[in-house]
Amino acid sequence: QLDALPEFQSHSTLLTAMYKNRLVQKKELERFESSLAPHQKAIMADGLTIVERGVLEHNMVAVSHLYSSIYFDQLGQLLGVVDGEKAEKVAAKMISDGSLRGEIDEVEGLLTFYP
């Protein structure tokens, strides 16, 4: 029903992708963010908006269902919004708070996911 309202079409696309545990593409995120009010686009201390942070964490979990391990440089490219170093920081935080199961090999720059 959201698709019937032009200003909410991007909401439906984003919600469907998240519900189906699909990677949210950068263009989908940009379309969604374009419909937000300025106060909803506030940049947080980590340099991301709240929505970007949420989508980044969602995409990290979605990637964990597709790969058993991945190098951070590849992960950063796949996520489309961060570099390898930023991907590693996000993964470390998610592992430490229990929202992602895995381990980080800092020497190899590799993230291994646990089922």
Image (cartoon, rainbow, N blue to C red):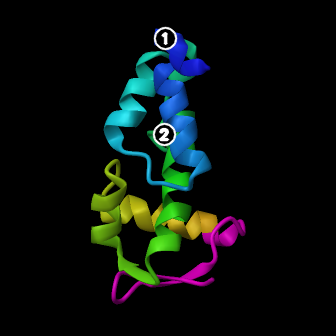
- Report x, y in % for residue 82: 34, 53
Residue ID at (27%, 60%): 77
| Residue sitting nearer the eye, 98 or 114 | 114
Vertical order, 35 against 69 (above or below): above
Residue behind mark 2:
52
The reply, left or right, for residue 105 in relation to residue 84 is: right
| Residue sitting nearer the eye, 63 or 112 | 63
Badge 1 amino acid? Glu
- Between disc 2 and disc 1, the foreground one is 1
- The single residue placed furthest to the right in the displayed view is 98
Res. 101 visible in picture: yes
Vertical order, 65 against 113 (above or below): above
- Report x, y in % for residue 15: 57, 37
Vertical order, 89 against 31 (above or below): below
Q: What element carries label 2?
A: helix
Vertical order, 48 against 74 (above or below): above
* Residue 9 sits inside the magenta stretch: no
Residue behind mark 1:
7
Residue range of the region highlighted in magenta in the rendering: 95-115
